[in-house]
Image: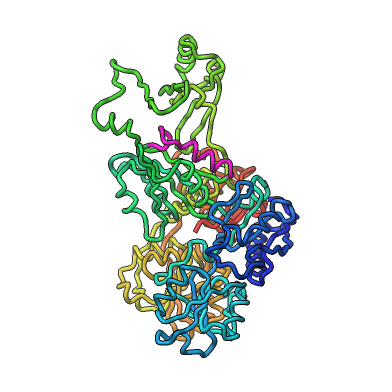
Amino acid sequence: MKKNIHYAVGARPSRLSLAQTEDAVKVLAGAFPGTSYRVVAVETPGDRDLTTPIEASAPDFFTRDLDDAVRSGKVDFAVHSAKDLPQEIAPDLDWFWLPTREDPRDAWVTRSGDSRALSPSRAVRVGVSSERRAAFARKSFPRAKLLPIRGAVDSRIRQLLDGRFDAVLMAMAGLRRLCGGELPSGVDVKPIPLDELAPPEAQGYLAVVFRAGDERLVSIRTHFVKSVRFVSAGVGDAGLCTVVGRRDIANADAVLYDALFDQSLVSSLASSSQRLVPVGKRCGAHSMTQAEITRLICDEARKGRRVVRLKGGDAGLFGRLAEETDALAALKIPFVVRPGVSALTAATTGTGLLLTRRGESCGFTARTPRATGSETPQVLFMSLRVAAEEARRLQAEGWKADTPCAFVFDAAGPREEIVKTTLGEVESVVDDDRPGLFVVGRAASRRWPRLGEFAGRRVLVTCSEAVQERAVLAVEDRGGRPVRWPLIRLEPRRLEVDPSAYDAIVLTSPSSVRIFFEASPCDRRRLPEFYTCGAGTDATLREYGVSSDVMPRSDFSAAGLVEEIREMDLRGRRVLRLRSAKAGPAVARALKASGARVDDVVLYDNVFCAPPGGLPPFDDVYFASASAVESFLAQYGASKLRGKGIYVMGAPTRSALPEPRRKLSKILACI
């Protein structure tokens, strides 16, 4: 992203719209330093017409004039409450959601001190602005008189205070944004639990709308969307889905699944918080058209969700994969495709109907009568040694010399390489005898597009196994090709103390959390408080049924925790600080300075390691710890970092880099 770029941002003129647009601008300015933004107020039909019920209004009631301002170039993009967007956006416009979500709940709003406002026995006057809220109000207060309410959030509050209503149902997101995170004075606000009144999926999110094809905004969107995973689920048996495919499903926000496989796979791996959408197509019975499926994939990705498109068999064989990936590529949204077990291999290798047998058959043809196209690509399993001979044979059979072909070496491995040429040039390319696949035909001229922040670059992921999976997800989310190359192994030490004897335990990494729970013999019902250094450590803690009692408010690091501890009075409290052998004493010193009695205990050692063989080809490298940096430098030297992109989890990791590389590194949080 270039610096010193200025944007005109469209927003409705209400106080809430202007406030939430400022929130959006802060997110964008934080992600793209050097950019600046000027907010332009534009009225929409929803601002001018305060009488038409929302249910009876046009789909673009709150967006029409802003859309026109975007089209005309008066503004570069517009910011909306995501729930105000029409279900279908005009084809000349594009959009995405920002990742930060305000409180999605609805709330009862009454005048301060009016204890009778929500009494079921009274015929209270309730202001409602949608059928969803009206139905909930009817159920909650059968005697209530439901009245339509329109206008901006501050206008609705004024109507309540003026006595036109006894209670109003409103979104918590609007109340908080309008008042800078606080709740408005003069009223009482009672949030409604999500399991009592489910909000629309868009409630609390902000959306950005821009001209389709505007490369500046497409580039900005790349920062906020995640790669779509096309997972080949196998056939017949849920066990035929690959390990990485199962991982993708477990980590997805939304799963769009076909009908041609064991659907127990979805129910066994998906959680209640995931959006599960059946999109299977069988002959004569389509739950969705292909165009609808493709649009849904794109829309879910634009919302910033980690989407899995789950296909039966192998996604690349007769699965209309290209139609879905082409749509994502047109929007510059990255994607990953997982190969899988197809019906072809299940029906032949799995049953004994072998398609190749020495001395009997040297190959086979796979076709479908439904597909169109005149060419059947050739795939030869072979070494380069005989490639020239095969190329001559194919030309003798009628294949033209300019037919595209490709050699694929170490497919899906850390040293994967694809060499493209033509049949007539094969002999000049052959210079070794590595085994590989020889692909002949137009298929050999294509490759998946390189999209996302990493644009298909190979990223060396050096983390220990404890954080390897999350780092791989983070790289894939941004369109990179992770190369697993762990350089640190964590070796736990025997824990000689009883954690339940302390008032608090300090853990400052996800690895320390996992090792603690694996090593600790204590009764989890008697665990003390936990002090952690940030959201990633806290998220890992929650996997074990507990959460942080003390955590930095913004600086998610050991240094941030030290600042938090300095404001605490810990006199008389016993605190157990558990750390790696490489961690410094700063946290223990801060605890003692605050009055705590501290036992500083080494929980594990960081041991240098590396996969066998030399470094594989890579474009970028990701370090999640200072120890990984030290291991890389010790085993390969700083010169191997020259010309490479360097990404680190945080400032402590960055500080371990040599000075020239330190300034060039970028922060990439993986948790």
Can the viewer see residue 244? no
Q: Quadrant of residue 548?
A: bottom left
Viewer-closest of 486 and 543: 543
For residue 644, above or below residue 85: above
Residue 283 location (% of width, % of height):
35, 37
Assess whether residue 250 is covered by the magenta stretch: no
For residue 196, above or below residue 628: below
Judge left or right: residue 15 versus residue 175.
right
Among all residues in the image, which is located at the extreme top? 396
Q: Measuring 55% from the left and 70% from the top, which residue is drawn there?
A: 173
For residue 273, above or below residue 601: above
Residue 616 location (% of width, % of height):
51, 38
- Magenta range is 314-332
Q: Quadrant of residue 140?
A: bottom left
Residue 205 location (% of width, % of height):
55, 63
Q: Measuring 52% from the left and 45% from the top, which residue is drawn there?
A: 460
Judge left or right: residue 13 versus residue 374.
right
